[in-house]
Image (tube, rainbow, N blue to C red):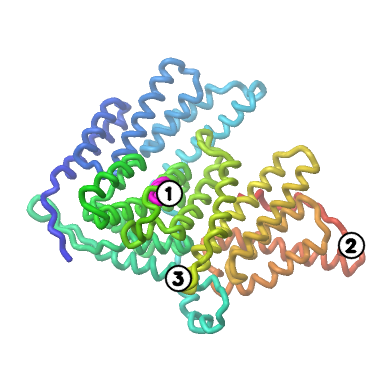
Amino acid sequence: MPVNKKPNQERDTAEQLKALGNEFYQKGRYEDAYKTYSDAIKKDPNNAVLYANRAATYAACDARKATEIDPTYAKAWARLGTAMHALSSWKRCIPVWERALACLPPDESMSATDRRLKVQLEEGLKKSQDAIDNVQAPPVVQLTTGPDDVDKVPWKRALVKEQQLLPLNKLSSSFAILNAYRDFSDGVEHMKQIQRNPSGGGFLWFGRTDAIASISNGILRDQRVFHVDSDDWFDKYNLQVEFEANEVKAWIGSGPKMVKEEAIKRLKREGWQSVRHALALTVRAWIMRAFMEKSAGNHIVGSDFYRHALDVLEWGRQTWPNVPKAERGVIFELSFVRTVKKLCLGAMHQRLCHRDADCVFTKEDLAELARELVFETDANPPVPGDPLDAGGYLSFWHHPKGEAFSILGWYHMEAAFRSDEDGDKYHHFTESASYYIQAAEMYPEDDEYYPYYLKIALEAYWLRGAPLRDSLALCKRIRIAIPKMLVFWEVSQMAEERDKSLKEALDWEVEQQRALVEDTKTLDSVVKIIDRVLRSPV
C-alpha cells in the first residue's frame, strides 16, 4: 500500500549538511566538520552514516592534535590514517601512513611492539592504496553467477533435487540452503518493489514492511545464500531500510544503551505491538549491517554491530523472560539468538585473525563464547511439536555448533603454534583435530564444510604427527564426501580455496598408499610434516 509521507525537508537539509561536512573534512577542517555532522544528526537522527562520519571526524581531530604535540609519535599518525580511511579520504591517507612508518626506529632497533605496529601501518597503507585502485568496486563480496553458472549455484541445484531427497528422510545441506534461499529471495522480491517518489516537497512511498525480516532470515539460516542480482541492489536495500525504519520508528542509528532506554519508555506509552516491530527492525538492520561490513572486509565494524545486536537480544531475554513470543517477538527466541551468535563468532574470529591492535576481546574470550554456544545449544534441543522445516534443524542447531567447534579447533591450533613445549604442542594439535572433526560432523556429508573441516583436522595430524591409519582414515572420509558435496556446492564462494585444499589431501593419500604398497611405510608409521600444510587455518 502507498504510504503518504509528510514533507521531509529536514532529511534534505541533513543531506546538504552532510555534504558540507564532507567538504570540511576533505579540507582538514575537522572541528567544522564535526559541528556540521552534529547539526545534520539533529535534522535526521536515524541516519547511521552521519553518526559514523562524526565519530571518524572526532577521532581525526584528536589524532591530528596528537601529531601536532609530538610529530614523531607513530601511533598518533596511525590513528589519523585510520580515521581518514573511515571517511574514504584515501588519497590523503597515504602520506599519513607513510609519515607514521617514518616515525618508527630502524629495523635493527625495533622492539616487538614496534614490529607489530609496523605490520599494522603497512597494512593500513596497502588498504588505502587498494581502495584508490578499487574505488568503483562493490561494497560487499558477492557470488558472481554469470550465464554459465546461474543454474549451478547451490540453491538452484537443491531446488532441482528437492523432491528426490525429501522422501529419504535424511539430512542434506540442500534443505538448509534451499530454505535460506526462499526466505532471502522473498525478501529481495519485496525489496525491489520499493518506490520513493517526490510529492509536494516530500515523498510518496510505495513498499512492503516485511522485506528486511525475510532477507535477514535467509542470512541467519545460511549466510552463503547471499548474492546480488541487480546493479541497484544496494540502493534498493538502503531505501527499504529507511522505509521500514520510518514505518515502525526503529532506532537503527542509535546504540544498544539508547535502544534499551527508548524501548522501555515506548512500551509504557504504546504497548508491545509498537515496541516489537521497532526492536525487530533495529536488530535485523544491525545484523545485516554487520554481515555486509564483514563481507567487505570491515571486520571491526562487522563484529561491533553483531555484538550490539546480541547486547539487545540478551537484555531483552533477561528483561522480559516470561513475555510470550507473540508479544515480545521472535528475535528473543533462543534459536534466533543462537544464529546471531554463530555469525558473531565468525566476525570476531576474523577480527582476531587480522591482528586488530585495538580489539577489546582475546582468543580466550572467543573460545569461551564458542564453548557457551555449544553448551546452550545442547541444553535446548528442539521441542517435540515445534514447527521445524526440513532445514531448520541444521540452521538453528547444527550450524551454530559447527561454527563453535571450528572456532575451538582454530583456538587450539593457534595455541600449538605459540607454544615452545613439545608436550603442549602435541596436546593442542590433538585438541584442534578433535574439534575440527566435530565441526565437520555438524554438517551433512554433502555440505562443503564437511570435507573442508576434515582437511584442517588432517593438517593438525600432520603438524602433531599421527599414525598413517588415522590420517588415511580422514583422507578416506574426505574422498568419499567430495562427490556428494559437489552435487550442490560445485559453485560457491569458497570453491577455489576449498578445492585446492582438498586436492592436497587426495594427492597425499595417493602418495601414502603407494608407500604402503612399496613397504616403505606401515599403517603404524607416524608421519609428521609441516611443509605440506597450505596455511594456518583462519
**In front of the other: 237 or 139:** 237
Q: Secondary structure at mark 2?
A: loop
The residue depicted at 46 percent of the width and 18 percent of the height is 71
Q: Where residue 254 sits: x, y (%)?
A: 31, 42
Residue closest to the eye, 150 or 321 = 321
Q: From this viewpoint, is residue 137 visible? A: no
User: Does residue 99 appear left or right of residue 421 in this picture?
Assistant: left
> For the magenta stretch, what is the residue range?
311-317
Q: Which residue is mark 2?
A: 521
Report the Cα–Cα distance between label 1 and label 3. Answer: 22 Å
Mark sitting earlier along the chain (2/3):
3
- Does residue 352 lie above or below 170 as drawn? above
Identity, as a three-letter code, of the amino acid under mark 2: Lys
Q: Say what amino acid the circle numbered 3 marks.
A: Asp
Residue behind mark 3: 386
Dot 1 lies on which element? helix
Nearer-N-terminus badge (1/3): 1
Q: Position of residue 43 (x, y in %)?
A: 19, 39
